């Protein structure tokens, strides 16, 4: 069959949905499907009756109430008059001759038997005509007592659908789009939603849809399994309704009608299946995309983790290198201190070699008012000074040797430069003593302290030595801490006098 050749499914989405809803309904026993089914059938019957009344007018449809019971519906249509007249309006000339009631309907009570001729002719003509139009047909017995009113309703609504199609300017071949399962599907949906609150609907729909997809996939896979060995045996059917037996004429008509319905169902099923396939394909694409995204994210996390590990490793390496560097610096610093210590020792050894007692001679200049000719200094040369001395036998000379002789032009800075290395030895633990010796007015105070009006340039050895000690102590403050104290005494006539007493007393120490 064509369906098999096209690889179509032997079931429709609607049937799957119906089954799922049915199962759902079975799980929820409180649903009263029978009453829903009756309600739905009544609704469709009212729709069919309303349309027929509209088509033939209220007067002609006086035997057909707007909302008829099944019995009223059947009685209203059993003469075939309304059906034929409506059909002629939809398709002019479809029933060439409609046999009207011979007497006023008002005189005949409802349900009264009409003539067999009327009954047979009208209904038969109607059936033939709608069959030619491809409209789902009914059986003449459906209009008899105990007949299937549902089938009559279906035919009328199909005719209505055909009419609508024509009025909307329908071209080509009209295909009946109705589905006998629709009412039950619609009912099932209603029944399922009946006792649900609005907020429960999305969850319910989601659950039903996922079950539909699941069911659909199961059926597809099982269909493929069964279709493989004998694809030609695939049949297109909906429902489990077996072919019914009937008379030769009816059977032919029914076969044709059944074919038409099946074709229509098949087409609709194909469309639905195509739609489902597209949906599934789309979902699969989304799923695949999400899988790729997840994979990308995993890769990113993996890369980030690797990067973090690398950075951590680098950091540890840097930290280790820094530690080594600091260790090296500490080692160098301790080496530096050792070298510095060594330097000091060497320096002080040099001072010792120069001699622990040094004697310098300084000749002060003439004071203002003193004649230059009175100088006794003959000449000064390095560490020697020659003095002119008076004698009985004429002038004499005497030479004296010192570590160094500073002449009248020697500055305070030049004098101190020779003391400075010894002063610095004090900070390395050496004892140093510097004192001036000479007669009154020879310049001891000037050399050791400076003149009365003290300036930076004229400062003497004491100020310069203290200044130098504080500078060096400051340079070494990170490694050494020095305490500096000063004492000034005067030794005069075998008496030691403290020169820094501030309480006015003249403190004297016994000379020892
Ligand atoms: N090198 C010098 N240059 C200029 N003036 C000097 C120099 N040496 C000493 N004088 C001056 O000579 C004078 C006497 O000097 P100073 O008072 O220092 O002598 P002194 O040895 O301390 O005396 P005394 O023992 O009496 O205290 C002071 O006026 C001082 O300014």
Image (cartoon, grey):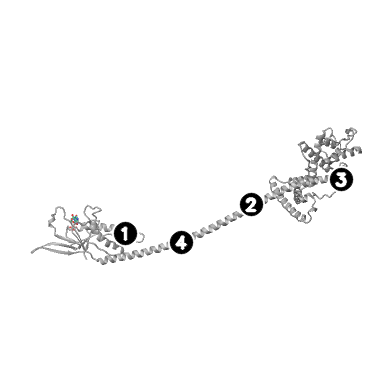
Q: Residues within 10 Å of mark 2 (few under 14, many from 20)?
A: few
What residue is at 17 percent from the left and 64 percent from the top?
A: 400
* Residue 48 in the figure: left or right of residue 472: right
Q: Quadrant of residue 488?
A: bottom left
Between 209 and 248, the one lying in front of the other is 248
Residues at discs 2 and 1 in contact (Cβ within 8 Å)? no
Please give left or right for residue 36 compared with residue 487 in the image.
Answer: right
Q: Which mark is residue 472?
A: 1
Q: Element under label 3? A: helix
Q: Label 2 belongs to which residue?
A: 289
Mark 3–mark 4 Cα distance, whole angstroms, equals 101 Å
Mark 3 or mark 4: name the one nearer the start of the chain: 3
Which residue, given by chain and number where applicable, does mark 4 sit on? 321
**Where 448 falls versus 208 (above or below)?**
below
Please state which of residues 472 and 406 is positioned toward the viewer in this rendering. 406
| Mark 4 or mark 2: whose residue is earlier in sequence | 2
């Amino acid at each position: 069959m064509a369906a098999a050749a096209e690889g179509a499914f032997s079931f429709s989405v609607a049937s799957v949905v119906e089954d799922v809803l049915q199962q759902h309904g079975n799980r929820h026993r409180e649903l009263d499907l029978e009453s829903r089914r009756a309600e739905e059938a009544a609704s469709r019957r009212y729709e069919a009756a309303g349309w027929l009344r509209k088509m033939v007018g209220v007067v002609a449809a006086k035997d057909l109430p707007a909302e008829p019971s099944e019995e009223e519906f059947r009685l209203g249509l059993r003469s075939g008059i309304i059906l034929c007249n409506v059909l002629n309006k939809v398709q002019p000339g479809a029933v060439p001759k409609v046999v009207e009631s011979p007497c006023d309907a008002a005189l005949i009570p409802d349900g009264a038997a009409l003539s067999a001729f009327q009954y047979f002719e009208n209904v038969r003509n109607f059936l033939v005509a709608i069959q030619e139009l491809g409209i789902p047909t009914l059986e003449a017995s459906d209009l008899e007592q105990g007949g299937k009113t549902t089938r009559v309703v279906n035919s009328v609504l199909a005719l209505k659908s055909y009419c609508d199609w024509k009025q909307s300017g329908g071209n080509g071949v009209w295909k009946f789009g109705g589905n006998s399962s629709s009412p039950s599907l619609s009912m099932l949906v209603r029944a399922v939603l009946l006792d649900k609150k609005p907020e429960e609907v999305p969850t319910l729909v989601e659950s039903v849809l996922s079950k539909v997809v699941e069911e659909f996939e199961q059926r597809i896979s099982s269909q493929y399994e069964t279709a493989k060995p004998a694809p030609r045996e695939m049949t297109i059917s909906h429902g489990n309704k077996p072919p019914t037996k009937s008379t030769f004429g009816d059977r032919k008509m029914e076969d044709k009608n059944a074919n038409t319905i099946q074709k229509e169902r098949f087409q609709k099923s194909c469309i639905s299946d195509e739609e489902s396939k597209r949906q599934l394909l789309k979902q699969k694409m989304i799923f695949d995309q999400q899988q790729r995204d997840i994979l990308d994210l995993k890769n990113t996390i993996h890369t980030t983790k690797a990067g973090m590990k690398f950075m951590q490793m680098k950091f540890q390496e840097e930290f280790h290198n820094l530690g080594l560097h600091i260790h090296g610096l500490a080692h160098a610093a301790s080496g530096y201190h050792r070298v510095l210590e060594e330097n000091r020792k060497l320096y002080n050894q040099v001072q010792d070699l120069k001699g622990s007692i040094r004697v310098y001679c300084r000749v002060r200049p003439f004071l203002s008012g003193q004649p230059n000719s009175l100088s006794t200094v003959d000449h000064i040369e390095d560490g020697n000074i020659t003095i002119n001395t008076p004698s009985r036998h004429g002038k004499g000379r005497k030479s004296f040797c010192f570590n160094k002789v500073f002449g009248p032009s020697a500055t305070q800075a030049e004098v101190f430069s020779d003391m400075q290395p010894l002063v610095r030895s004090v900070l390395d633990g050496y004892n140093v003593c510097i004192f001036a010796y000479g007669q009154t007015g020879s310049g001891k105070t000037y050399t050791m302290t400076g003149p009365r009006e003290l300036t930076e340039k004229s400062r003497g050895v004491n100020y310069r030595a203290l200044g130098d000690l504080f500078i060096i102590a400051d340079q070494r403050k990170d490694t050494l801490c020095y305490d500096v104290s000063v004492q000034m005494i005067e030794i005069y006539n075998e008496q030691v006098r403290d020169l820094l007493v501030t309480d006015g007393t003249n403190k004297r120490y016994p000379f020892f």
